[in-house]
Image (spheres, helix red, strand yellow):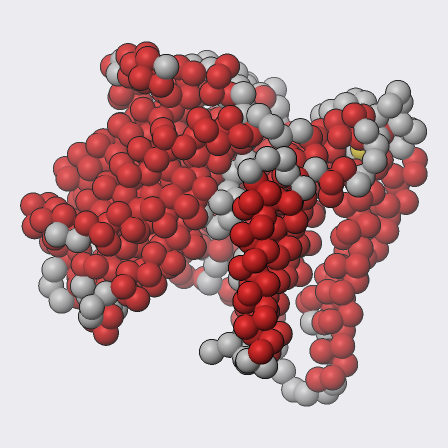
Amino acid sequence: MVLENLGLAFAAVFEIKTVLLIFAGTFAGIVAGAIPGFTIAMAVILTLPFTFGMTPLQGSATMMGVFVGGYSGGLISGTLLGIPGTPSSVATTFDGFPMARQGKPGLALGVGIWSSFFGGLIGAVLLVLFAPPIALFGLKFGPWEFFALIAFALTIIASLASESMLKGGIAGLMGLLIATIGDDDITAISRFDFGIDAIKQGFGFLPVLIGLFAFAQLMSDIEGGEKAQASLMDVDAESVSVEHGRAVRIILSQPINLIRSACIGVFVGALPAAGGSVSNILSYDQAKKASRHPEKFGTGIPDGIIASEAANNGTAGGALITMIALGIPGDISVAVMLGALLIHNVIPSPTFINDEPVLVYGIFVAFFLAHFVMIGLQAVGMRVFLKVAHLPKYILASSVLFFCATGVFALHNITFDIWTLFWFGALGYLMKKFGFPLAPMILGVILGDLAEVNLNRAYMSDPDPLLFFTRPISLFFVILALMSLVFPFWQRARHQPWTALFLPVSAVVVSIPFWISPGVLKLVGLAFAVVGAFLIFKQLRNGAPARE
Amino acid sequence: MHVRADTVIGALLVVFIATLFAMTFDLPPAPYETMGPALFPRILLVALFPMCLALFVKSAVRDFREGQAKREIASFAEWFDNYRNVLAIYLLFFMFAWALPWAGYLASGFFFLMLAQLALGPKGWVKVPQFLAVTIGILALLYFIFRVVLLVLLPEGEIGLM
């Protein structure tokens, strides 16, 4: 069945037009990723309007190209300038930049590009293997489970907001509130429209996303008087020549580092969490801990570049698992990706794989193919990417902004969308200035409708709110949401004695949903409870010492 | 006493949330067996209120504790120099959105792109031909993609400039 679907999908994707679109998408993704400050989400946003007239498969395939290109493009500026193009390439700079400064920029780029490639392929294989069973598991979800899962996704994004968890929480809830503006999906009654007709339809989420994210980012880039006249990246493109053969040999000599890093990336990506921005750091840290020469990390060794780049491209595969199987995005770039798919009437959910097998497997194939395209483009087009990133900020900012306005207008052919872009651009910029993270708000805007519809369905099925706590899967996500809320406090109070009990107590609490589940899952609950109880006993016997 | 931005934002958010909460009582009751249009926003607003209040109180307490402690505040000239580009672009974008329905896509787009580059780019007339070339190039490219390829009906405007 899987092979048959894959065969049909291969035939659909390997049409000349679709392949060319994957090329174009990957090219756009690499260029956007290579420009510092232009994140993958921005790359997806900017490419989306071009795909409006395409079929769902062509549009999704193009987006996959952008997605893969964006993940690998971020390493270019990170390696050559020490400024990561995207947050998912932060750890790449730790060793990539020192290696480039040692006179080996071609090798540093080669190791990064090929690690991205291998990491992405591992992610693609795991995507094909794991998405269908997870979707099958998702079929057991009722509205209670979906609502609890969305709550978990939002709490974890808010709790990972580096600036302030309080501000992250406010931003996330505000995002959900923005999604309630306009007609209610169930009753068609308009809310918070202030008597303005255009608002009664609600804000289109694309203008809101572009405003909050792209507009605000562009404004941040041009701050500071004469700085707008500088280019975002200043590297002599002619001096860079990628060493492919040597890079591949180095990577293949470290298979454990490569596979471990890609798996960490897939795992982190599959969680409704922080995606590539977390996985590259986590993977780098694990590679350093497992290394025989950890002291060399940060001095320009390939091990660190492999760990970071294999992880961030692996994350893309992991994030697609949860998004396609459950319809829940993890980080901001996947949230935007989900929005892009929705525009093409591609609505990921647990039934999606069964309902549209050719389309889903087509997305998988496009994701897989995009990695080969990425390698090809990086091999021949590195100098072009560097030259695009060399453009002065004032040209980039004005043209990208004008392009954003054209793109949002093209969506519904109404100027109100351009006003939406303007107001949310101002809001996003002010939020950035005052330390409110944008990711929770964007996730809130995208998940708002889904959250309300599922809460409504749950209410219509049975208005008893206790069902959120008595259904095992729902309770599991509620517990995870509560744990993610406590997590930042635990991190901050690392030297307090009570923090030593956090994980054991969490293990015991997590066992509860397994206890109330039918069948063999009770044994899993028993295992969690026993391990948790043992650790609590051990900590109490030792006087709950402060953690190191 | 110097008041932090968070104190002002927290206070404004508290008032805003309370206003929206009051507005939910103007919404019609739930039809049939649904939870109605007001319940979900109310849940969000009830969760938001203590958080915004906490932001306000936390920041106000810090303001009060620091009292008259001297803090460096940028002069208006410094502030303006830092934000003039941002203000210029917001103003130009506002004018673009306002002019679009009556001046049309090409005319309003031309002025936006030219003026944005003049505001942000190097001063002097030397670069004007470059600005002009970039403007015409971008306009032509986007017009071709959206109007010719994607068949989007871009605003033609009322004064016939397109």
Relative to B39, A71 lies left or right: left
Q: Quadrant of the N terminus of chain A?
A: top left
User: What is the total number of numbered labels drawn onto the structure image?
Assistant: 0
Relative to A292, A316 lies left or right: right
Relative to A231, B62 lies left or right: right
From this view, report whether residue A94 is shown above or below residue A363: below
Residue A472 figure quarter:
top right
Residue A349 % position (x, y): 55, 26
Q: Nearer the viewer, residue A99 or A247?
A: A247
Relative to A407, A4 lies left or right: left
Residue A469 % position (x, y): 73, 43
From this view, report whether residue A432 is shown above or below residue A348: below
Residue at x 41%, y 40% (from the top left corner): A318
Q: Nearer the viewer, residue A100 or B68?
A: A100
Residue A30 % position (x, y): 29, 40
Q: Nearer the viewer, residue A389 or A462?
A: A462
Residue A127 % position (x, y): 37, 33
Residue at x 39%, y 53% (from the top left corner): A279
- In the image, farthest residue toward the bottom: B69
